[in-house]
Amino acid sequence: MAYLRQDRPNGDWFVGFRYAGNEFRRSCRTNRLNRAKQIQATVERTMAFLKTTDLKIPHGTDPGIWILSGGKIESKPAPNGKRKSDRFGVICDDYLADQRQKQQTTLAGEKTHIKHLKRVLKARTPLTAIGLDSLRAYQKCRAREKHHGKPTSDATIKKELVTFRQIWNWAKNDDRVQASCPLLDENGRWKIRLEKSAEREKFRTWEEIERRIKRGGLSEQQIQELWRGLYLDQAQVAELLSSVYEAGRYEFIYPMFAFPAYTGARRSEVLRSYIDDFDFDANQVLIRERKRKKDKKETTRVVPLHPKLRSIMEDWFEIHPGGPWTIQCPREIPRRKALTAFTGLTVNQAHRHFEMTLEESTWSVVTGFHVLRHSFGSNLIRSGKVPSDVVAKWMGHTTMEMREFYQHLFH
């Protein structure tokens, strides 16, 4: 059933109704109650026809506006005369094709989210038919599914629904749909309740983590999470790099580890780096970042060039196989097809080489490049020689939350 509400400031009437799990609230464009009641009756009559006859809302038409008009508004054709598909799967594919400015890791995550969204919500479903009820059913379905033997977390489900919201907003800007995303109410609050994630663990030393594990009572997941918060002191960083120097299968492995250890660069920033970003005359390295400013494709920051990193990079560039990227694997690697051109490492390639270099060693608990990044920041803070705002600038922290994350390291 439709309902009427009057806007207090100007006296105009609004009609509200639900269709396909979505809530619609449209202005009657009148302050006369009798006219508003006529519109209310039109809405109820049209919705009754939708339930009891073969009447269907035309593809690409906003259900709210169509129902309000009594079914008189036709769908808008695309500029080239062809009607744009309203199928959810097609819209998802078109959305991904339009995200060329995003990082590889971001796109990889969105592709995984979309795979689940298309599977559960069904790719052939019209986007306008996916309402709040459908999304609540999606939440329940994903919560029952398991990954590596563990139920899908609410944090993961929320990321998938955030991707759905981005797809919906993109489709709205592309005139595929006119209604607002059913996930949010008029004030922008989520209509679906999800458990809040726990606050991230503070960075801890190797010894602190081992003590907590030794006490017992922790699950495998909790232990893994502790190691994700590991930071290495300066001596341990030096030992790790020494081990990498001995164990690295290829010449680029050692500088690939040293780069984040002495600059705090993110993995993506290491892989995005060019040889020319190292200015040995000015004794600094340029870091290319993409997280600090959302309206810019790429921004930069400058970090002083540590003497040890300078020496490592000067030696590396002497034997560099070619190409513009700082980290470059050789064209020919055993049991792999030879490269026809120089290309930088992908995220997956870098992570695989990271794991292979540390496996079966004391350092196998180091879970990724982020440990080297956070060790860089943590050791600077603990030294007391560099102000926290300078550390934040060198590391490219984008939020005050990340800056405060290091404050517990002050003694």
Image (cartoon, rainbow, N blue to C red):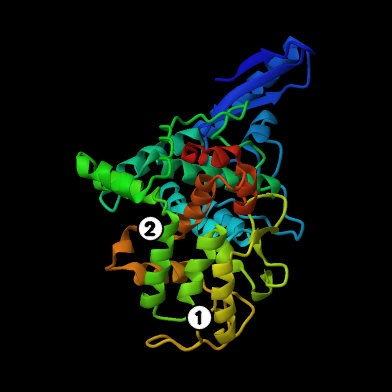
Q: From what the image shows, is residue 34 above or below residue 375?
A: above
Q: Amino acid at mark 2?
A: Thr
Q: Secondary structure at mark 2?
A: loop
The residue beneath circle 1 is 329
* Crowding at mark 2 (Cα within 10 Å: few <14, some 14-19, many 20+): some
Q: Which mark is residue 367?
A: 2
Q: Amino acid at mark 1?
A: Cys
Q: From what the image shows, is residue 208 above or below residue 30?
A: below
Q: Which mark is residue 103?
A: none
Q: Position of residue 156 (x, y in %)?
A: 42, 45
Quarter of the image that includes the N terminus: top right
Query: Nearer the N terminus, badge 1 or badge 2?
Result: 1
Residue under the image location 69 percent in, 74 percent down: 276
Q: Position of residue 262 (x, y in %)?
A: 54, 62
Q: Position of residue 172 (x, y in %)?
A: 66, 44
Q: Nearer the viewer, residue 104 or 386?
A: 386
Q: Is residue 219 visible?
A: yes
Measured Cα–Cα span from mark 1 to mark 2: 22 Å
* Crowding at mark 1 (Cα within 10 Å: few <14, some 14-19, many 20+): many
